[in-house]
Image (tube, rainbow, N blue to C red):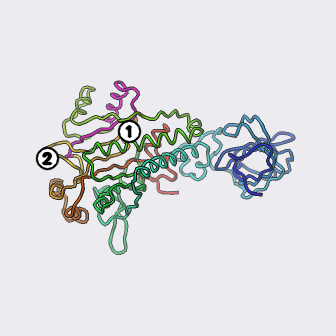
Amino acid sequence: MIRSYVSDLKSGEEVLIKGWVYEIRNLSNMAFILLRDFSGIVQCVIKDKSLMNNISLESVVEIRGKVKKAQVKAEFARRDAEVEVSSLKILSKAEELPIQVNEKAVKAELPNKLDWRSLSLRTPRAHAIFKVEAKLIEGMQEYLNKKGFLQVFTPCLMGVASESGSEAFEVKYFDTKAYLRQDPQLHRQLTIIGGIEKLYDIGPSWRAEKSNTIKHLTEHRTCAVEIAFIESERDVMRVEEQIILNALEKVNKECKEELKLLNVELKPPKLPFLEFNFPEVYEILRKSGKKIKDGEDLDTESEKILWDHVQKKYPRVEFYFVNKFPFVKKPFYVYCDEGEKYARSTDLYYKGMEMSSGGQREHRYDKLIKNVKDKEMPLKSVEWFTKFFRYGAPPHGGFALGIERITMVLLGLENIREAVLFPRDPSRFTP
């Protein structure tokens, strides 16, 4: 008999199902178990209690039986069907659990959940989070593929630290040393110069920052996009808006049950997104009592004040751009008009949290070299990158959108680590 999945069960069928024992209820003359597989949970009715010998929570079992219509009240289980069990085989018996997997039980604290991650991943809530995250990525890819963007894979090992060496992880590379990339951007730019005008890269990046906050990781993933022949950074912003919209519409359409389980009501945003520009941003902050000088970057308090301002003045807005950041605070590769203090550099915010950084890149070789010198960087350290701009580089720009961050904010998670299968932070790199 071919295995059936819980989501596909139909009344009247004789079925073979396999999965984990999520819950056990023993009565005097019969028993009930909730069987969980990747597609859902179903109640199984066991009238022959001899079948229950040695069964334990989270044991992996194989059940044969007949599907019947029912009105099941068990949480997370199918409401319309149950399986009357004719045989039960234990494939792998579970020992006493170190943490509870059934979400009706006392919930473990997040550090304990992460210590026993392969067990905490078994919960319906965890499955819902990662199904939503997968559909977000799928929605981004669908839009980009439809618009002719080419998916590429840029290197994760760098011969030199891509931005600031103090934030890069150093690794041994044969008889020398290399670094884990902090962002795939520089190789995306070189790919643009290679004539691939529209591209995206979905993959990991690393930051050696000792930031033990609810929104930081040392390893995170992005959907990173680069586009050639742009007029300004706003061409990039329009693409990012569409990616966000398509991703959220995908989730709304295909994750109804997951959103319901997570108690999330998702309303796709209207385009274009609101935009705040420097130096006007400083005036908003000062009117709210924030002491800040022109040329300073936004700190956490500034971001919160700006989000409070958005909520008061634009109550239905959740996504907004902050544009024209002070060039003095930005890397050498950011485009800045001659004589200007503010660069074509943009960050996207979602409910007050930064989701991405991007904008227009500097494509003019002479200006790029001047920027390197002005930032007091050794020319030799970036020559591998800058030399290609001598041979024809189109105006271009892009962004890198944090996948775990947008999942966190969308679902109202308390900690970004909940949106990562096996999170990495300054104090955790196992399991």
The one of 99 and 15 positioned closer to us in this rendering: 15
Mark 2 or mark 1: whose residue is earlier in sequence: 2
The stretch in magenta equals 300-328
The amino acid on which the numbered mark 2 sits, given as a three-letter code, is Glu
Residue at the extreme top of the image, as rendered: 312
- Taking the image as shown, residue 269 lies to the left or right of residue 107, namely left
Task: Give yes or no for contact between labels 2 and 1 (Cβ–Cβ under 8 Å).
Answer: no
Identify which residue is drawn at 39% across, 26% down. 315
In the picture, residue 233 is in which quadrant?
top left
Which numbered tag is attached to residue 353? 1
**Camera-nearest label, 2 or 1:** 2
Report the number of discs.
2
- Please name the residue shown 32% across and 72% down the image: 176
Q: Which residue is mark 2?
A: 338
- In the image, residue 294 lies at what x, y percent? 19, 37
Seen in the image, is 234 located left or right of residue 421?
left
**Could you tell me which secondary element the residue under label 2 belongs to?**
loop
Quarter of image, res 29: top right
Circle on res. 402: none
Query: Quick one: 67 or 28, which is closer to the camera?
Result: 67
Work out whether 251 lies above or below 115: above
**Residue 206 lies in the magenta stretch:** no
Q: Is residue 366 left or right of residue 58?
A: left
- Of 396 and 16, nearer the camera is 396
